[in-house]
Each structure stands twice: as C-alpha cells, then as structure tokens.
Image (cartoon, rainbow, N blue to C red):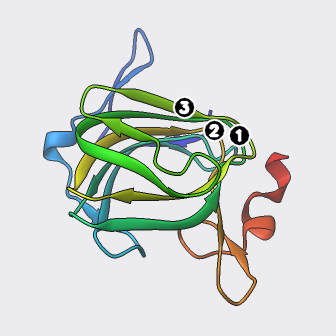
Amino acid sequence: MDAATPQAHQTADTHSHLVRPQEMEWQKTRFPGCEAKTLLFDRKTGLMTALMRFAPGTVLPDHEHVNIEQTYVLEGSLVDKEGPAQGTTAKTGEFIWREAGSRHAAWCPEGGLILAIFQVPNKFFEADGRVVDAAGADWDEAWGHTR
C-alpha cells in the first residue's frame, strides 16, 4: 500500500504504523468550519481515515459517498441536513455508515469531532455543475480510476 500518514512511526518487525494525532496540527479544509487530521491516506486507492473537527453550524455541502463511508461521533452530532435521510442524527458515542451511492448534505449544529473512514473520496456537487473531490479537484480526473 502506498499510504501516506504524517508523523507515522513504523515498527519494522510488524509493519505497524503508529500515528499520534495529538502531535499533528489541524489542517483547514475548503469547507468553512471544518478541519482535519489525516491519519491514513492511500494516494492510489483513495482510502482515507481522518479525524474531522467541525465548528458549530458547519455544513458539508451536497456530496455522494462513492463507496461505503463509516463515521464514529466522538463529540457533538452529525445530522443529515438534506437528502433521503434528512434529520437522521448521529450523536456522541454513536456510529453511522452510509451505503455506496448515498447522497446528502451533512450538518454539525453544535459542532463535533468525528472519526471518518472513506474507501474512496466523496464526490461534491458544485453549483456550477462541476463534480469535485474534497480538495476541489475534478473527481473523474483524480479518482475515476478507482471505479
């Protein structure tokens, strides 16, 4: 696996990769109020595990989970703001997973801290019709090979 994990400590005998999130800086994302610490990212497949921190009222706009997404809420709550499951709320200590192809906008009314696991980066639907990844890159160009 060609995985990149900042400040990972590899154990030669076991090939375990110890990550110390408490030593990592929060990275701003292009979504206001959302910061992340990437714990695992495989540049080839798009597999990613991240701690995500949301300020109160933060909204992740219209997006699709290309493959299964898993989320464990460590603090606060994560609410389906729009989409078929509108109003579904995962609270502190709860786990929610979303099927491949599910689409929604997510909201953290009181803020939150979550552990998120993505098999492939999400598709975000821009107002101008573009489909991009979380970094703003054209999704098909960056991740089309993962289908």
Q: Which of the pair 33/141 is nearer the observer? A: 33
Q: Which mark is residue 67?
A: 1
Do the CB atoms of the residues marked 1 and 2 lie less than 8 Å apart?
yes
Decide if residue 78 is on the left or right side of residue 70. Answer: left
Q: Looking at the image, which residue is at 69% across and 43% down?
A: 45
Q: Are marks 3 and 1 in contact (CB under 8 Å)?
A: no
Instruction: Give the farthest residue toward the left.
Output: 22
Q: Badge 2: few (under 14), some or many (20 or more) residues near its Cα, within 10 Å? A: many
**How many discs appear?**
3
Q: Which mark is residue 97?
A: 3
Q: Amino acid at mark 2?
A: Gln
Front one among 51 and 79: 79
Side of 132 relative to 41 (left or right): right
Q: Position of residue 141 (x, y in %)?
A: 79, 69
Between 73 and 52, the residue placed more toward the observer is: 73
Given the current orientation, which residue lies at the most extreme bottom position?
128
Query: Alpha-carbon neighbours of circle 1 within 10 Å: few (<14), some, or many (≥20)?
Result: some
**Gap in Å between the C-alphas at discs 3 and 1?**
10 Å
Residue receiving disc 2: 119
| Element under disc 2 | loop
